């Protein structure tokens, strides 16, 4: 049990700005297994975002509540996934060979593609959330589950690349290398269970079982991104995972808008 708790705190510290307790010592083997708790980290980020949305909406109105929730999730994760998305936009937008794409993504500076990509992705988040929460029939529990589901599911889809594709950046200074290598396959099942629980709860409390259809577009976008990454760089990098998480989060919101409207 203590080992599992240590692995969870390792995942929490790696994927967020939440500090790890002092008694949890660093072990690379913990980081190898931390993938199983990636969706559970999404629970925490989503819960914080949802609570900030509810508090912000009560105090300032829905629009500012959404912005507060977005700012809170970004601060909590240190913009880890947004940074990966921006780097991926720059790399795949400005590079035409594997070597050049990887070189651009490694650059800490943000280029035009990255800036435009961030503006678009944040705009999609804001307006899609505005559409979802503007429904007066949504009860307070549902926004919380909405945020938790989106953050958990999107992180799960991103983590599946670790099990299905090849990690291509093997330099010693790669931050994602310990996560990408040495991961046991049973971690995928644990991550899936942690990702699907919030979705099932959302369908139950919202009274809309067809919301589970969101798994279909997520599967399709995962296939497309997998083929795209493989075509251009032969696999994935940490930035690719960040981009996948951000894109899947948007796909979840957009799919829910359609399903909420027609179910």
Image (cartoon, grey):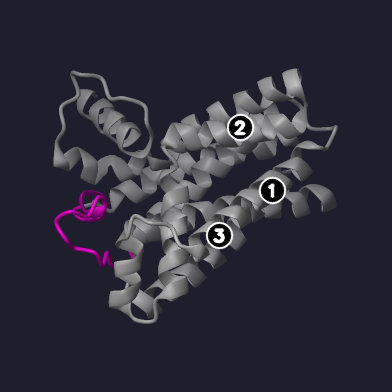
Question: Would you identify the image quadrant in which residue 6 lies?
Answer: top left
Whole-number angstrom distance, CA of label 2 to CA of label 3: 20 Å
Residue 137 inside the magenta-drawn segment: no
Can you say whether 38 is above or below 136 in the image? below
* Viewer-nearest residue: 212 or 237: 237
Look at discs 2 and 1 and give the one toward the viewer.
2
Q: Residues within 10 Å of mark 3 (few under 14, many from 20)?
A: some
Q: Which residue is mark 1?
A: 211
Residue 168 painted magenta: yes
Other residues around mark 2 within 10 Å, as few (<14) / some (14–19) / many (≥20): many
Q: CA distance from mark 2 to mark 1?
A: 22 Å
The quarter of the rendered structure image containing the N terminus is: top left
> Which residue: 66% across, 28% down?
53
Q: Which of marks 1 and 3 precedes in the sequence?
A: 3
Q: Earlier in the sequence, mark 2 or mark 3?
A: 2
Q: Secondary structure at mark 1?
A: helix
Mark 2 = which residue? Answer: 69
Q: Residues within 10 Å of mark 1 (few under 14, many from 20)?
A: many
The residue lying at 75 percent from left, 41 percent from top is 130
Q: Disc 3 versus disc 1: distance between alpha carbons?
A: 27 Å
Of helix, strand and loop, which one carries label 3?
A: helix
Picture coordinates of residue 257 (x, y %)? 75, 50
Say which label, 2 or 1, has the lower sequence index. 2
Question: What is the secondary structure assignment of the residue under circle 2?
Answer: helix
Instruction: Quickly name the residue at label 3.
Output: 117
The stretch in magenta equals 163-182
Q: Please state the horizontal and vertical placement of residue 157, each as a whole percent of the image.
A: 46, 54
């Amino acid at each position: 049990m203590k080992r599992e708790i240590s692995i969870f705190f390792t995942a929490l510290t790696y994927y967020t700005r939440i500090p790890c307790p002092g008694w949890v010592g660093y072990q690379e083997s913990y980081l190898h297994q931390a993938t199983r708790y990636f969706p559970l980290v999404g629970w925490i980020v989503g819960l914080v975002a949802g609570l900030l949305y509810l508090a912000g909406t009560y105090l300032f109105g829905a629009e500012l509540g959404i912005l507060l929730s977005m700012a809170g999730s970004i601060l909590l994760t240190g913009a880890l996934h947004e940074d990966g998305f921006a780097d991926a936009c720059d790399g795949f937008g400005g590079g035409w060979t594997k070597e050049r794409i990887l070189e651009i993504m490694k650059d800490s500076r943000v280029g035009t593609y990255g800036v435009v990509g961030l503006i678009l992705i944040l705009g999609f988040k804001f307006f899609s959330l505005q559409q979802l929460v503007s429904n007066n029939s949504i009860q307070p529990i549902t926004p919380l589950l909405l945020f938790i589901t989106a953050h958990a599911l999107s992180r799960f889809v991103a983590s599946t690349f670790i099990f299905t594709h090849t990690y291509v950046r093997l330099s010693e200074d790669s931050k994602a290398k310990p996560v990408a290598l040495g991961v046991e396959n049973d971690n995928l099942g644990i991550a899936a269970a942690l990702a699907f629980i919030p979705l099932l709860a959302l369908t139950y409390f919202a009274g809309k079982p067809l919301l589970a259809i969101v798994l279909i577009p997520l599967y399709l976008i995962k296939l497309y991104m997998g083929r795209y990454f493989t075509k251009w760089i032969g696999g994935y990098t940490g930035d690719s995972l960040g981009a996948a998480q951000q894109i899947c989060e948007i796909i979840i919101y957009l799919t829910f808008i359609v399903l909420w409207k027609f179910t």
